[in-house]
Amino acid sequence: FAFTVMGFTGEKAFAWKWKFIESFRAMEAELMALKDREASALYFLRPHWKEIGEGTAAGMRRAEIARITGHKSFDTITANRRRMRNAGLLI
């Protein structure tokens, strides 16, 4: 963005553009780290969510996930998936 839109030229402008890009990347990394910490906290509180999320991402059916997590009802998997979507852990 900075290189194409901003018409700055010269050595100082080039340095500023790189600093802008580096700052943007640092902000992105910080946001991703926050997301990872939040997900870890939720997985700590609900450990089976990690298995449900991984199973869902792998395309597993509810019955397969229930067998892995020890849930008796497939509806429990559906309810947990809904809660995980509401928490932003599933798309």
Image (spheres, helix red, strand yellow):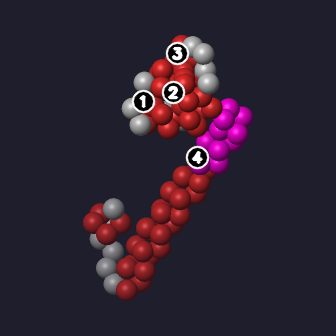
Specify whether residue 76 is painted magenta.
Answer: no
Local SS, label 2: helix
Residue 69 located left or right of residue 58: right
For label 1, the residue is: 60
The residue sitting at 29% across, 63% down in the picture is 5
Q: Please give the residue where the numbered disc 2 appears in the rendered image.
A: 65
Cα gap from disc 3 to disc 1, whole angstroms:
12 Å
Judge from the rendering whether residue 72 lies leftward or rightward of residue 5; answer left or right. right
Residue 37: where, in percent of width, then height? Answer: 64, 48
Q: Secondary structure at mark 3?
A: helix
Instruction: Report the Cα–Cα distance between label 3 and label 2.
Output: 8 Å
Horizontal side, residue 79 vs residue 1: left or right? right
The structure residue drawn at horizontal position 41% and vertical position 37%, both measured from the top left corner, is 58
- Magenta highlight: main SS: helix
Please provide the residue range marked out in magenta: 36-47
Residue beneath label 4, please?
A: 35
Q: Quadrant of the N terminus?
A: bottom left
Q: Earlier in the sequence, mark 3 or mark 1?
A: 1
